[in-house]
Amino acid sequence: MNYRHAFHAGNFADCMKHALLVWMLRALQRKPAPLFVLDTHAGIGRYDLRGAEAERTGEWREGIGRLLDRPADPGDPLSAYVGLVRNYMAGDMPSYPGSPVLAQSLLRPQDRLACCELHPADHATLEATLDRDRRAAAHHRDGYDAIRALLPPAARAAAPGQPAAPIRRGLVLIDPPFETANEFERLEQAVRDARRRFNTGIVAAWYPIKHRAPARTFLDNLAAAGEPDLVAAELLLRPPLDPQRLNGCGLLVAAPPFGFEEAARDILAALATALGDGEAVAEVRRVTPEGGAAR
């Protein structure tokens, strides 16, 4: 309840997570079937980078600030993500779009978005940010509980007067604040629960890398449990030697869309070049193949 993302919005970890999220949502929309997107730890949706919180840390200046300073290039692997951010930064109320707003901006009429936020004030802000969009809902609830409550997605009619049909495609984003000592264990269980309840969807779980051991154990445990089709995309700004510092981060993606691994390599390489200072390393690797046995 104490974590406030406004201090960290637009930092390198947001850039990595959101660039991959935008690519995956656009990839899913290659087909016309409806999507369900669940954002379990949504925050407030948009963040004022001129506000006191963002200015106190200044983290965004070494993240999205660097990307916005680069000239627009349609061939840049980051162009789709940065283009969306530019749209929000150029409006009457310039702000950085978090995952709920990025997902909302990509929704088609047939798609649905559920965003969960436990902090009362942040939930109220999120609800106002979504602006009564009938495709999107803000839930005042714990994100981990939401996996059990909101998955599988409720059936919906394709058109008025037609019978309701289940939504079989979509993405679950699990992005906890990592404030508790057992957060990796909770995240591991959440990934397994989400896959069991929505076995035709994609599950993406963000995790910090301060030092290697916790992240490695998290991935190894999922592999040992027999979870198939896992890919880990990681960006390290510096060697993970200081456990008191966020040295990098990862996004574990279960059942990624076709072409994800190649696209993620290009995206992370571009981020490493733009945000790193000579030490950045990007890596995309298979944790388990589609059949389930760990590589």
Image (cartoon, rainbow, N blue to C red):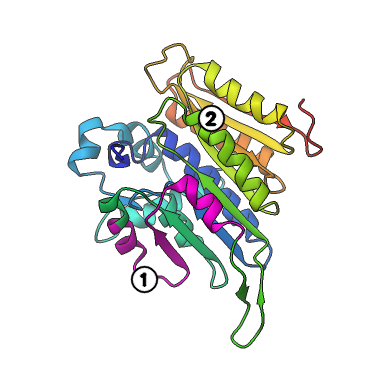
| Residue 18: x %, y % from top left | 48, 44
| Residue 12: x %, y % from top left | 41, 33
Residue 74 seen:
no
| Residue 122: x %, y % from top left | 29, 51
Q: Earlier in the sequence, mark 2 or mark 1?
A: 1
The residue drawn where x is 65% and y is 53% is 198
Q: Residues within 10 Å of mark 2 (few under 14, many from 20)?
A: few
- The amino acid type of the residue labelled 2 equals Glu
Q: Is residue 205 above or below residue 94?
A: above
Magenta stretch: give its range.
124-152
Q: Is residue 126 magenta?
A: yes
| Residue 275: x %, y % from top left | 43, 29
Quadrant where the image shows the N terminus: top left
Quarter of image, res 215: top right
Q: CA distance from mark 2 to mark 1?
A: 35 Å
The residue drawn where x is 57% and y is 61% is 36
- The amino acid type of the residue labelled 1 equals Arg
Quadrant where the image shows the C terminus: top right
Tell me the residue that label 1 is attached to.
Answer: 132
Tell me the residue that label 2 is attached to.
Answer: 185
- Left or right, 79 with respect to 87, comes to right
Q: Residues within 10 Å of mark 1 (few under 14, many from 20)?
A: few
Q: Is residue 93 magenta?
A: no
Residue 91 seen:
yes
Question: What is the secondary structure assignment of the residue under circle 2?
Answer: helix
The residue positioned farthest toward the top in the image shown: 241
Which is more toward the observer, 165 or 108?
Answer: 165
The residue positioned farthest toward the right in the image shown: 291
